[in-house]
Amino acid sequence: MRALDKIDTSTLGGRIRYARVKRKLSQEEFGKKIHARIKTVSRWECGISIPTADYIAGICREFNVSADWLLGLKR
């Protein structure tokens, strides 16, 4: 089973992790692309916190995903 198949994409954190792993990036590399610290990315992926609207827009732009998909409004 591929790593992507194991990621739970039913949560915002899971979809963020999916976008990161799909591009074979570490949390640090992902964070650098959107100007976030590794600890921040980890908290998003674990569901401890959620990204601000600015970060959501950055994730969508950088990783070519829609805000609807990222927020779980569209599969």
Image: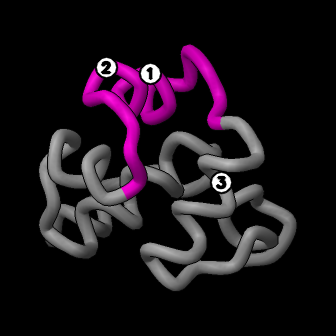
Q: Measure the C-alpha gap from mark 3 to mark 1.
A: 14 Å
**Image quarter for residue 71?**
bottom right
The reply to whether the C-beta atoms of the residues labelled 2 and 1 are less than 8 Å apart is yes
Residue 72, placed above or below residue 1: above
Nearer the viewer's eye, disc 2 or disc 1? 2
Residue 38, placed above or below residue 33: above
Residue 14, placed above or below residue 57: above
Residue marked by disc 1: 43
**Tag 1 or tag 3, which sits nearer the N-term?**
1
Q: Measure the C-alpha gap from mark 2 to mark 1.
A: 6 Å
**Residue at point 38%, 45% (across, down):** 35
Q: Quadrant of the C terminus?
A: bottom right
**Image quarter for residue 63?**
bottom left
**Tag 3 or tag 2, which sits nearer the N-term?**
2
Residue range in magenta is: 34-51
Q: Quadrant of the N terminus?
A: bottom left
Q: Residue furthest front?
A: 35
Residue 52 among magenta residues: no
**Image quarter for residue 2?**
bottom left
Q: Residue furthest bottom?
A: 64
- Numbered disc 3: secondary structure: helix
Identity of the amino acid at label 2? Lys
On screen, residue 46 versus residue 51, left or right, reads left
Identity of the amino acid at label 3? Ile
